[in-house]
Amino acid sequence: MANKDAAKGFWPVKSLVGGEIRSREYVVKVSQTIRVGDAVKLVSAQISVASIASATTDLVGVAAHAVTTDASSVGSLKVYDDPEQLFGIQTITGTSATASMVGQTAKINAGAGSSVYSKSTHELDIASLSTTTAFMVMGIIETPSNNWSSSGHTDVLVRFNQHRFKAPYAAT
């Protein structure tokens, strides 16, 4: 059975080192629309949404809720910012997702998000597998309706490979 195409950005699953899932509050830059599940970056002590181009630098976590700021005011945002946090995310359409991806890294495909539900549409771009990009694949989200798939839309477990608060993993 094919996996359902339902991009929803990142969602917290558990911590790699145990304990509870935590978030911390940050100041959001002006003129930002951040959706639940968007990867976010920290620049000059303020949060902004990560785009495809910026998704390898200054990443600090995942938005716990949605926020929109205008051109004249900043806002606040709770962020899942633990560098050892594990997240679920769906893989992009049309690219084969296999168990051989575990341990490799990929970048995000940062969509515009849903303005109706304030949800992210970020997906994992597994066409970009390497050992140096932003998110490391740790495995598959184990549910009856999810499987490794040649057509994509596989929900996988990832952790930050590049995070503002830790050094990146270097393959040996």
Image (cartoon, rainbow, N blue to C red):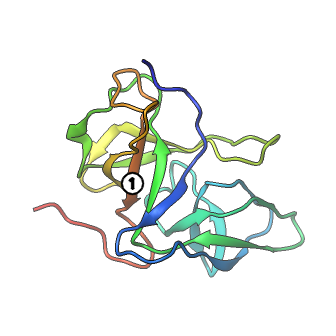
Position of residue 107 in the picture relative to residue 102 (left or right): right
What residue is at 68 percent from the left and 79 percent from the top? 25
Above/below status of 156 relative to 1? below
Above/below status of 91 relative to 64? above
Which quarter shows the C terminus? Answer: bottom left
Residue 84: x and y in percent read: 39, 71
For the image, the number of numbered tags is 1
Position of residue 84 in the picture relative to residue 99 (left or right): right
What residue is at 79 percent from the left and 68 percent from the top? 30
- Within 10 Å of disc 1 (Cα), the crowding (few <14, some 14-19, many 20+) is many
Above/below status of 9 relative to 159? above
Q: Amino acid at mark 1?
A: Val
Res 120 seen here: yes
Res 134 seen here: no
Residue 33: x and y in percent read: 76, 56
Instruction: Tell me the quarter of the picture where residue 110 sits.
Output: top right
Position of residue 105 in the picture relative to residue 107 (left or right): left
Q: Residue furthest front?
A: 144
What residue is at 46 percent from the left and 30 percent from the top? 145
Q: Residue furthest left?
A: 172
- The residue indicated by pointer 1 is 158
Position of residue 130 in the picture relative to residue 123 (left or right): left
Residue situated in front as seen by the camera: 3 or 113: 3
Which quarter shows the N terminus? Answer: top left
Dot 1 falls on a residue whose secondary structure is strand
What residue is at 42 percent from the left and 27 percent from the top? 152
Residue 2: x and y in percent read: 44, 20
Residue 70: x and y in percent read: 87, 63
Q: Residue furthest top?
A: 1
Residue situated in front as seen by the camera: 18 or 62: 18
Residue situated in front as seen by the camera: 39 or 147: 147
